[in-house]
Every structure is written in structure tokens, then in C-alpha cells.
Image (cartoon, rainbow, N blue to C red):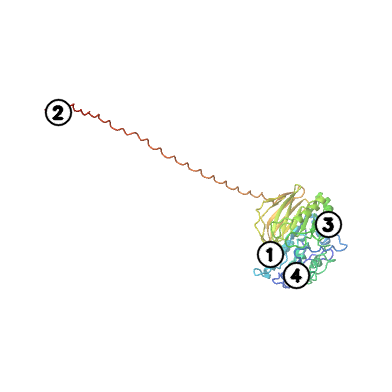
Amino acid sequence: MPTKVNLAGPKGQLYADPVPTTDEDAFQVNNTSAAYYKSPYYLANMKLVQPIPPPRAGAPSHLDLADYLPADMIAAINSAGSITFHSTGDTGAAKVSAQQSAATALADEASVADAMAADVRTSGANTPAFFFHLGDVVYNFGEAQYYYDQFYEPYRAYDRPIFAIPGNHDGMVFGASSSAPQVPTLTAFLNNFCAASPAPSPEAPTIARSVMTQPGVYFTLDAPFVSIIGLYSNVLDTGGGIISSQGGKYPIPDVQLAFLTAELTRLKPQRQAGQRAIIIAVHHPPLSCDVKTGGSGGLMQDIDSCCKNAGLWPDLLLSGHAHLYQRFTRTVNGRQAPYIVCGSGGFAATAPMTGTPPAGTVVGDHKLEIAPIIQFGYLTITTNGKTLTASFNSAPRNAPAKQLDSVTVNLVKGVLTAGGSAPAPAPAPKPAPKPAPKPKPTPKPAPKPVQKPVRKPAQKPKRPVPKPAKGGAKNKAR
């Protein structure tokens, strides 16, 4: 695909500044949003979901990439027979503390954005066509005044459209009263990603990038060889993502379940014909080995229910929320699909809160393929509708991006052809307990020596003393 600088979309959209300036090292608007965690409204409602804004009236639920890229670029993608795009999440630079300055936070996000922009400039025929953002564009409460520092300025050189689903921080709300938020949920996200027409953002009037015209916070992007179904998983920071009422547990409608089932049904014939890959993107991960941002059982059940009803399962599932990179393989109906967590876009790379199982560990229908990667980075995804490859690239500051992981799926057979791991080694068997030593036999007392009887020497018989004769004495005297 030809590389174009200062791209203009078919409806006048602009994506990059003509001559991008150097990266900023200080916030234009000092970010004090961490204080809102103590606001009465947040404290009273932090464990509650927020309303889902309805789609823009009259807007179709699915977008066509051809409405965002020039016709010759779409033709080049079709001629090449494959498409490449970027994806990552959790990009907003706002983590400032005693250990991290604003300059460091901004540099971490800029390292990812700059590496992606470099891919666009230098990738030649495999130039990425767009960036699909996995949510948490702006921290901590999605406030409009921080869109310049956390989104428009870092991506001012990224000369491609950026589509996005909201993360929990984009929709979280605060307020001085516990009964109503100061600003309704997702207000700034809707203004910058779901506008009625492309125009400069009111939050960044000096940046060339136009606002996006997505129909709402959930939608499908149709591009050559791939469709990405984006879902909104609401605002809970812990406890998992929520896309439905979950049987009346949450006070939101089940509109996303109907949407997901309808989109899978619509795309099923093209998927079965090998014309396109099907990807589901949702901010909260259905699978994760991080305790705080761990897998969402209810979310997984909702997605599975829609897939079962439509008779079609995703070839790849993408999530963010956990600030690291993780990759699982899930096997459903004999077919394998990667489930990838890539919340590595620039906000506070964070190791799991507890130890993780070794790579190759299998739990139920899924396997952890590699140990989590705690580095900033992004995904480069390429597909021709019959195979799909997703690669994770680290983006260290002041150094070129480096590929750290990759997986390839044969979409026809539903099997991984590269990137599978060996099963985790079985735990070493515990050594058998040593047998107790046999008691030593009590020694028998030595037999007493038999004493032979001492034979007394035979006594000589005594001679009998002769008795005197009767009257002998008298006779002698005579």
C-alpha cells in the first residue's frame, strides 16, 4: 500500500499535523483528576454501572473503512490481498507520583505513539491502515480538558484514522453531590469519537486531527479482509466488564447483546467464505491472570451466548484494562482463537498483583501461552481473511520498537500455526515419605552359663573305733 503523508480522508478528515513538533515534556493542563476519587459522587457510585449512551440517531451500526481512507489506498489493500493495522489500549499519560514525573508519564505514552507513527511512515506495502484503540484514552475520568495532552498531542504525527471503544476511565464520573455527576458519563468521548461530522476537536483546535464519526460507544468497523466488533464494558475498575443487565443484576438494557448477535449473524456468510476475519474488541478482558483486572466471567458468558446464537465465534478477541501484555489460546468447538490483553499503550505498565501460573498452564478451555510482558507496546495485526497474525512490539523510550511475541492462526482450520506453547511442566511429584526405621530387636539376654555341680572328693571311710572289751580294765589292773 502506498505510504501517504498528511493523509486526507474522502470526507475531508485530517489525521496528522503537516510538520509535527517535538514531544511535549509537561502538561498544558495540569492533571489533578486523581482528587476526584474522593468526590462524594464517585464514593457513592464507584461500584455501580453508568448508563449506556444510545447510538447517534440515524447512524448505521457499522462503519466502512472506505469512508475514512482515500479510494486508492483501499484499492491498494485489496490488490495486496491483506490488511495491516495497529491496536493497543490504556494510553493516557496521567500517572504522576513521587516516583514518576509528568515528563516521564508523557514520554512513556509518546514512545508508543511515536513507534506506531514510524511504522506508518516506513512499513511500505504493509503500512498499517488504522489504529483501533482498546479504551482508556483519557485518565482518570475522561475529562475533556485532558484530551490534548493525553490523545491529540501524542498522536499528532500518526497519519491514519484512530477508532476507539471507551474504557472504564473514559466513562467514570465524579461530582460534589452524591446524587448526580458533575458531567454525564462519556461526554468527552462522544464529542471526540462519535461526532456527527469530522471537524477539529474543541479540546485541541491547534492539532490537525479531526474528530471521528463513529455511531456510538459500540459499533463494527468493516475493512477489507476484517471486521472488528467493538463493545462497551462500562465503568467498573475492579469486578470485570459489564455489557448487559446479566439477567437483571445491573440496571442497563441488553442492547449490546442484540447488537453483537446481529453483527455476528450479518458477517457469518463472509466469514464462512474465507473473505474476512472476525475480531471482537472489548476493554475489560474476559481472560486475564491479573487479580485486580482479572477475567470477567459474566462478560465471557454474554459473549459466548451471542456467539452460540449466531453460530459464529471470533477469530481473535482483543482487550486492554490490565496494563501489560498477555496472550491466551481458547479452544471452542475444536477451534483455537487467541485472546489477547494489550493494555500497554503508555499508562503505568504494571505487573500482576499476585504470582502468575507458568506459560502453558491450561484451565478449562484456555491456555496461557506466554508469561505476561510488563512493557509498553502495541499490536500489529495482519490478515487476508484466511490467516491472521498478531505481533506484540515493545516501544522503549529512545530506542526502536522490538517484536516480543507473535501468533499466527489458520482461520480455515481454526488452529494456531505459530505461537503455541508447550504445556506447562507438571509439578514435580512430592518425594515419598521415608519409611520409619524398623525398631531394633531387643537383644535376648545371654544364657546364663550352666554351672556344673562341684563334685566333693570322696571321703575315706572312717575306721571304726574298737569298742573296749567288757571288763578289760579290770583285767588289766590285775
Dot 1, how many residues are within 10 Å of its Cα: few (below 14), some (14-19), or many (20+)? many
- Look at the numbered discs 3 and 2 and tell me whether their residues touch, using CB distance below 8 Å: no
Task: Pick whichever of labels 1 and 2 is earlier in the sequence.
Answer: 1
Q: Which residue is mark 3?
A: 259
Observer able to see residue 81: no
1 vs 2, front mark: 2
Residue type indicated by callout 1: Ala
Determine the CA span between mark 1 and mark 2. 152 Å
Q: Are marks 4 and 3 in contact (CB under 8 Å)?
A: no
Distance from disc 4 to disc 1, alpha carbons, whole Å, reads: 26 Å
Q: Nearer the viewer, residue 250 or 74?
A: 250
The three-letter amino acid code for the residue at tag 2 is Lys
Q: Which residue is mark 4?
A: 40
Which mark's residue is nearer the viewer, 4 or 2?
2
Residue 331 shows in the view: yes
Q: Are marks 4 and 1 in contact (CB under 8 Å)?
A: no
Q: Residue tagged by mark 2? A: 474
Q: Callout 2: helix, strand or loop? A: helix
Q: Foreground mark, 3 or 2?
A: 2
Q: Residue at x 76, y 56 (%)?
A: 298
Distance between the alpha carbons at the discs numbered 4 and 3: 35 Å
> Mark 1 sits on what residue?
348
Q: Mark 3: few, some, or many residues within 10 Å (few <14, many ≥20)?
A: some
365 or 319, nearer to the observer? 365
Residue drawn where x is 13% and y is 28% of the image: 476
Residue 59 pos. (x, y %): 86, 62
Q: First in sequence: mark 3 or mark 1?
A: 3
